[in-house]
Amino acid sequence: MFTIDTHTHIIPKHIPDFTKKFGYGNFIQLDHHAPGRAWMMQGDKRFREIVENCWDAEVRIKEMAEHKADMQVICTIPVMFSYDAEPNDCLEISQFLNDDIGNTVNQYPDKFIGLATVPMQDTKLAVQELERCMKLGFKGVQIGSNVNNINLGEPQFHDFWAVCERTNAAILVHPWQMMGQEHMTKYWLPWLVGMPAEISRAICSMIFGGIFEKYPNLKVCFAHGGGSFLPTISRIEHGWDCRPDLVAIDNEFNPKKYLGKFWVDSHVCDHKMLQYIIDLVGADKVVQGSDYPFPLGEAVPGTLVREAPLSDNEKTIIMGTAAKAWLSI
């Protein structure tokens, strides 16, 4: 069974001091404090400790063999998006990160597939960098669930969606800048509550903003099983039905129309939830995704699907076939 892990993150081993270069902000730096270990630093604050599988392709390939994964889709860590930076500074960061991903893919083309990051705060620059990366062989782009708290369904992003559709770019929407995180700092709630909500925010804003109507050939995958969108789709439909004056102002169609029009990854941590999302969107719209190599991801990527009470055909589709369709490979 050919397997593609569609949701993994990577970062260069060494990162320039962008804070010093640009003269503002707290851009991520790596403090390699021990062999194979580094702190991601935001200014003098520790954001997260990572280990060498975050930057070393050969370590990743060894672990892929242990996990029985044939290929990984690699993209940056969302904290690197830098949407709050000046647009041209974000472009420089994006190019640095994308060049590193491109080099990794070029060195190991049978193991890695690249998704770019782009400066979404400036649509023109985002389009420019996306087109550059697609010409370099990238298969698509990873973007955040919002852009500086602007929802993805807003008109300012239409030109970006148009180019994604024209270039056949696969789009991975990943939660970041979680809503309300400043009010729920305890218990890891931004990750446990905010992330699922962010993905639902992204899906709802794109549906109600008419994005899938205007750009019907977009190839969008939403991380973390689509977050809280699918578990609450009937509530969302009920809102559309009972208050169309608030919900259906930019798109008249029932949100359930779009089930099966986009992909979600399989990282839902539960066999019953996995079956539920398959029932809603179809196995062909579910792709294996682990959030490797982070603790909140699958400890052994692919285990949930492999051990689920699914047919062999469904497992084959989710582990690889569906990803090939999303990525156009």
Image (cartoon, rainbow, N blue to C red):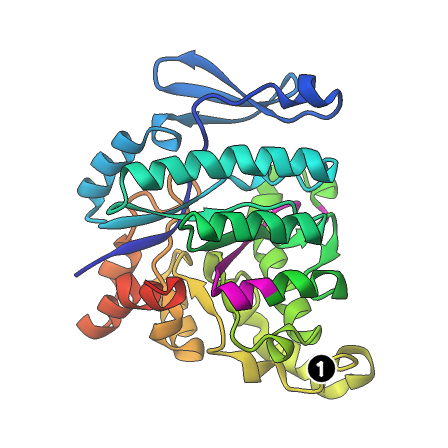
- 115 is higher (above) or lower (below) than 99: below
Q: Is residue 3 covered in magenta?
A: no
**Would residue 186 be seen by someone viewing this image from the given angle?**
no
User: In front here: 61 or 294?
Assistant: 61
In the displayed structure image, the side of residue 316 where residue 290 appears, left or right = right
Magenta residues span 163-180
- Residue 90 locus on image (x, y percent): 66, 37
Residue 317 found in image quarter = bottom left
- Residue 77 locus on image (x, y percent): 51, 39
- Residue 261 locus on image (x, y percent): 49, 77
Tag 1 secondary structure = loop
User: In front here: 78 or 305?
Assistant: 78
Amino acid type, mark 1: Asn
User: In front here: 270 or 321?
Assistant: 321
Residue picked out by circle 1: 251
Q: Residue at x 67, y 54 (%)?
A: 146
Q: Using a 10 Å C-alpha cutoff, classify the residue at mark 1 as few (fewer than 14 neighbours), some (14 to 19) or many (20 or more).
A: some
Q: Quadrant of the N terminus?
A: bottom left
In the displayed structure image, the side of residue 161 where residue 269 appears, left or right = left
